[in-house]
Amino acid sequence: MNGPQPRVGVILTGGGARAAYQVGVLRAIADIIPRDVHNPFPIICGTSAGAINAAVVAGGAANFRHAVRRLQAVWKDFQPEQVYRADFLGVLRNSTKWIAAAVSGGLGHQSVSLLDISPLRALLARRLDLDSIQRAIDAGQLYALAVTCSGYTSGQSVCFYQAAAGAQPWRRSRRMGLPANITLDHLMASSALPFIFPAVPVEGEYFGDGSMRQIAPVSPALHLGADRVLVIAVGGQVRHGSPTAKERESAMVYPTLAQIAGHALNSIFLDSMEADLERLQRINRTLSMVPQEVLQRTPTALRHIDSMVISPSEELEHIAMRHIDELPRTVRVLFGSVGATQHGGSTLLSYLLFGPGFCREVMALGYKDAMAKADNLRGFLGLHGEWYCELRNTAA
């Protein structure tokens, strides 16, 4: 016997339009797993746009392939107008309020954001069946869905989770896990990009994008009992080596507002995940050096956790530059005024470019990157040997 079937958690990180990459990876996984496996991820954790993807997959846990097809159908034909108001009056109204608030120091307690995302709420209200999450949990097809938000008043990173019996809340420094029935408000709050999208009230506090202050993004999956975590990230690999002459020259040009904003978003969405995975690897190495008999004599809360990361093999901002024309003219003018349509500002553009060409190309990249790791994925998901037999029996 190879031991019990691993409980695999998938972590879908934040990143606005970049979350199209996750859909491509999930589609590849749907093609990789055998047809008699209904759902390879009993624990699904999402943050920001990843929270919306996570909710769709969790609600469709009875048929993972069908859930992924539903996600793909939305993302491949996404239009910016489905996410935020792109008409002249809508853009002018929100951007004027935003600028006025910045100049005057605020507009009392009015909702202030650069873009109006009421179209996204309307789209999700039409497309999502959030009651299906509890049905999947009751049927044993899903153990838990977790959605992380950031509290503007408390400063806490709050993971709202909907789970089967046995899941326990947790509290750590600046972060906690609370049981909840996941609603549209949780998803809208988790994906509320700071400054750009408005904060959302949830259970007595206004919340914003869950990637802010999320110092331990792997933590929710571990608290909910995951033995392995698959991270589908939306940032490229860290570059090494000396910069080119062109890069050195551009580095001495004062950054545009879009460059600064893109750098800030990268810090929010990418840095904490990289640091948390490094911490996880250090714990694994430390545990591997401790003799088993010592661990048995002195129980510890620490345990070995296998992890696997799939992230873009190409820079998504470069892909975004090829699809600038997909932005509505009013939004293109607005973002062009702060340098987002220039190469140095394309990072910001890649978070907000909800156009079909960009989303399809990013999904195709996710599919390609995951398929390149197909054998590793099969082993990681426990689709070999006796683990696979147990998974088949559970699905049946």
Image (spheres, rainbow, N blue to C red):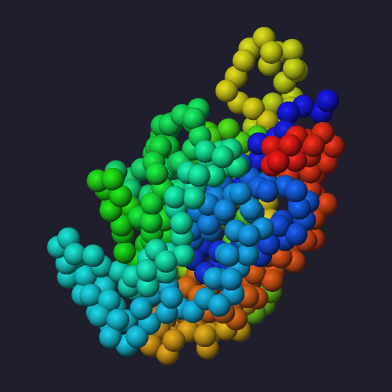
Q: Quadrant of the N terminus?
A: top right
Whole-percent x and y of residue 24?
66, 65
| Total marks in image | 0
Whole-percent x and y of residue 332?
43, 86
**Residue shown at 68% from the left, 16% from the top:** 295
For the residue pair 190 and 165, the one nearer the viewer reads as 165
- Residue 238 seen in the current view: no
In which image quadrant can residue 142 be found?
top right
Left or right of residue 1, residue 13 in this image:
left
For the residue pair 165 and 294, the one nearer the viewer reads as 165
**Residue shown at 71% from the left, 65% from the top:** 367
Q: Is residue 243 above or below residue 231?
A: below
For the residue pair 108 and 67, the one nearer the viewer reads as 67
**Residue shown at 63% from the left, 45% from the top:** 41
Q: In this view, does 142 lie above or below 12?
A: above
For the residue pair 139 and 52, the one nearer the viewer reads as 139
**Residue shown at 64% from the left, 54% from the top:** 64
- Residue 142 seen in the current view: yes
Whole-percent x and y of residue 21?
62, 65
Whole-percent x and y of residue 219?
53, 39
Q: In this view, does 360 lie above or below 54?
A: below
Q: Which residue lies furthest to the top in this view?
A: 297
Q: In this view, does 312 lie above or below 157?
A: below
Q: Quadrant of the C terminus?
A: top right
In which image quadrant can residue 232 be found?
bottom right
